Image (cartoon, rainbow, N blue to C red):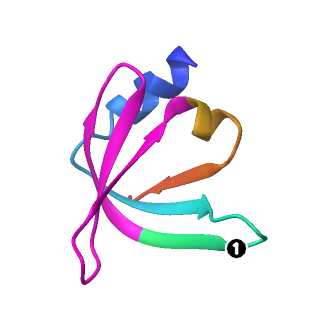
Amino acid sequence: MTSIKRDIESHVGEKVTLKANGGRRKIIVNDGVLEKTYDSIFVIRLENATQRTVTYSYSDVLTKTVQLVFAV
């Protein structure tokens, strides 16, 4: 879990593609910017019409509920 946190912290401020499990076999794909990391969660600002922020925990990445693809 700490290695996942360190990896995500190294990409703060970068563009990211977020693939999240929306339940009922629905996958949500959004582009955004990794804004901030905290002890147990990280914040992504989505770049769509609503400009909203979403938070996920590092365990979501571990269990593959959320997948992050960082822009090169």
- Image quarter where the N terminus lies is top right
- Image quarter where the C terminus lies is bottom left
- Residue type indicated by callout 1: Lys
Tell me: 44 left or right of 56. Answer: left
Comparing 4 with 49, the one in front is: 49
Q: Give the range drawn in magenta.
A: 31-58
Q: Is mark 1 on a helix, strand or loop?
A: loop
**Residue drawn where x is 34% and y is 30% of the image:** 9
Q: In this view, does 56 lie above or below 69?
A: above
Residue 36: image location, x then y, percent: 24, 38
Residue 59: image location, x then y, percent: 60, 31
Residue 63: image location, x then y, percent: 71, 38
State the image quarter where residue 28 is shown: bottom right
**Residue drawn where x is 41% and y is 35% of the image:** 8
State the image quarter where residue 49 is shown: bottom left
Query: Which is the main secondary structure of the residues drawn in magenta?
Result: strand
Q: Which residue lies furthest to the bottom in this view?
A: 49
Q: In this view, does 7 lie above or below 49?
A: above
Mark 1 closeness class: few <14, some 14–19, many ≥20 residues within 10 Å: few
Comparing 58 with 15, the one in front is: 58
- The residue labelled by disc 1 is 26
**Residue drawn where x is 58% and y is 60% of the image:** 20
**Residue drawn where x is 60% and y is 39% of the image:** 60
Q: Which residue lies furthest to the top in this view?
A: 2
Q: Does the magenta stretch include residue 33?
A: yes
Q: In this view, does 26 lie above or below 23?
A: below
